Image (cartoon, grey):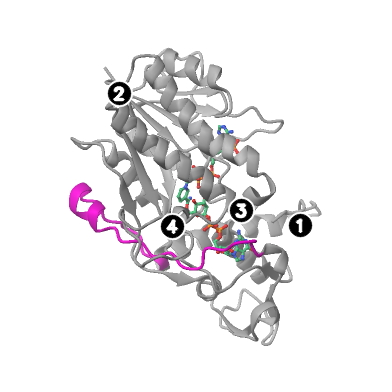
């Protein structure tokens, strides 16, 4: 019998990489996707299998973390060995605009899943992974942040995730469930949502180099993040559910980098040297040199500017994780470092926008890109 995994958030960045990993390990993978007026399965279309195939091992169910009846029915039908709760309104800045919905999906949604497992009498069968986050640390209490560092969330998203974290711990202790938190630091990839800062930068660097965009507007360039590759991080999720005892783990690289340096690294991948001048909202990034003959960027061109609209009402200034416990107990070690991550993301976006440039040259309009 194949093991069955149920993923919420299957259409997201991590959902796609985890699906790939679990299918490779021989799992039958079930995913919950939301109904949308447009197709929202781009990231997982490669795994599509004909619904008429009785032997298929990748199956999608319509659902939503805000609907407990739906979650109970799906858990009842699937009888999963493992649940990975990756579904969430995951954008920190947007959570200030939609705080109540964020609490419902990210906080109470976690409770709904745990309750579904408990009500259906699956506490001894089903293991649960909760997608917790370094955003829980928020206002810096100590660095590097580990499993014992106190939390101080700084956004409606982080507060909702704090509830998800503790309700997972509580169900583990109260009902003896195998339920664990992965406290994952930022992880990125070519599949990263376009409005998170790394992908916004890699897309913009590619478009600016190719003459498809003039400059990029960013918010706080001083924020520092511990960035890893999503491919490495989904392996940690899987390992967390394979231990003898359910426990919580920090997953991070242990290295932190300011947003400004990520910008420089992204342009440097294309042979473009960018220097920052000025302070605060007046800071700007200029091209110092361009050694790649494919891109005709003149020296002195302003390619980065600060737009305060991207500032958050309360910011998380510094994240740097201590992955010692994961290294020792899970044997987890990332394969990608930051330069490899940037190279992977840039290669993907340059290829994409080279095609878009060709289309433009042949008269096809490029859609507006929201940030
Ligand atoms: P994404 O934003 O790429 O994906 C989020 C997924 O959740 C999408 O599939 C989305 O569906 C789905 N979703 C959103 N709202 C609901 C809802 N109400 N009901 C059901 N599904 C919903 O996030 P990531 O893949 O980057 O992250 C996965 C999880 O890990 C999230 O919970 C995130 O908060 C958490 N996390 C992420 C980190 C990171 O750096 N990436 C770090 C730490 C934690 P749709 O495609 O329809 O929008
Ligand atoms: P984060 O990721 O908030 O850490 O949450 P994001 O990439 O959105 O921001 C990282 C840092 O960059 C600064 N920043 C900008 N951010 C965005 N999005 N757009 C900008 O233009 C911009 N300019 C500067 C931000 O202020 C911030 O300091 C991500 C999400 O995946 C969460 O779901 C997850 O829990 C955490 O990572 C760990």
Please identify, in this view, whether the residue under mark 1 or under mark 4 is nearer the observer.
4
Q: Quadrant of the C terminus?
A: bottom right
Q: Residues within 10 Å of mark 3 (few under 14, many from 20)?
A: some
Front position among marks 2 and 4: 4
The residue singled out by tag 3 in the image is 194
Report the disc number at residue 360: 1
Q: How far apart in space, not on screen, are marks 2 and 3 (Cα)? A: 33 Å
Mark earlier in primary sequence (3, 4): 4
x and y, in percent, of residue 153 in the image: 50, 54
Q: Is residue 238 above or below residue 289?
A: above
Q: Is residue 320 magenta?
A: yes
| Residue at 45 percent of width and 71 percent of height | 257
Q: Which mark sits nearer the N-terminus, 2 or 4?
A: 2
Closer mark to the observer between disc 3 and disc 4 = 4
Q: As displayed, is residue 363 above or below residue 40?
A: below
Return the residue at label 2: 3
Q: Are marks 1 and 3 in contact (CB under 8 Å)?
A: no
Q: Give the alpha-carbon distance from disc 1 to disc 2, as whole Å.
A: 47 Å
* Numbered range of the magenta stretch: 311-338
Label 3: state its secondary structure: loop
Label 2: state its secondary structure. loop
């Amino acid at each position: 019998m194949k093991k069955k995994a149920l993923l919420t958030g299957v259409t997201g960045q991590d959902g796609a990489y985890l699906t790939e990993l679990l299918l490779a390990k021989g799992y039958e993978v079930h995913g919950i996707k939301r109904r949308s007026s447009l197709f929202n399965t781009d990231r997982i279309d490669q795994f599509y299998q004909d619904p008429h195939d009785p032997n298929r091992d990748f199956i999608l169910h319509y659902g939503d973390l805000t609907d407990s009846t739906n979650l109970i029915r799906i858990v009842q039908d699937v009888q999963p060995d493992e649940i990975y709760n990756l579904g969430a309104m995951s954008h920190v800045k947007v959570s200030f605009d939609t705080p109540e919905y964020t609490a419902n999906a990210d906080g109470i949604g976690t409770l709904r899943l745990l309750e579904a497992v408990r009500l259906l009498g699956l506490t001894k069968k089903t293991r649960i992974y909760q997608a917790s986050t370094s955003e829980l640390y928020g206002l810096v209490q100590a660095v590097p942040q580990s499993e014992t560092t106190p939390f101080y969330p700084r956004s409606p998203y982080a507060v909702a995730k704090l509830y998800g974290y503790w309700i997972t711990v509580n169900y583990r202790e109260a009902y003896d469930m195998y339920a664990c938190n992965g406290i994952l630091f930022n992880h990125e990839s070519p599949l990263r949502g376009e409005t998170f800062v790394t992908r916004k930068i890699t897309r913009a660097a590619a478009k600016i180099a190719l003459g498809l965009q003039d400059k990029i507007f960013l918010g706080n360039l001083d924020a520092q993040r511990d960035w890893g590759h999503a491919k490495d991080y989904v392996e940690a999720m899987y390992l967390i559910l394979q231990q003898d005892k359910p426990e919580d783990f920090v997953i991070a690289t242990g290295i932190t980098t300011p947003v400004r340096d990520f910008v420089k690294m992204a342009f440097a991948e294309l042979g473009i040297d960018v220097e920052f001048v000025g302070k605060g909202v007046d800071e700007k990034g200029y091209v110092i040199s361009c050694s790649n003959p494919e891109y005709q960027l003149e020296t002195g061109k302003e390619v980065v500017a600060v737009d305060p609209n991207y500032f958050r009402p309360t910011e998380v200034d510094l994240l740097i994780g201590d992955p010692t416990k994961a290294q020792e107990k899970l044997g987890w070690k990332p394969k990608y470092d930051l330069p490899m991550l940037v190279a992977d993301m840039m290669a993907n976006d340059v290829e994409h926008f080279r095609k878009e440039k060709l289309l433009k040259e042949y008269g096809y309009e490029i859609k507006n890109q929201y940030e």
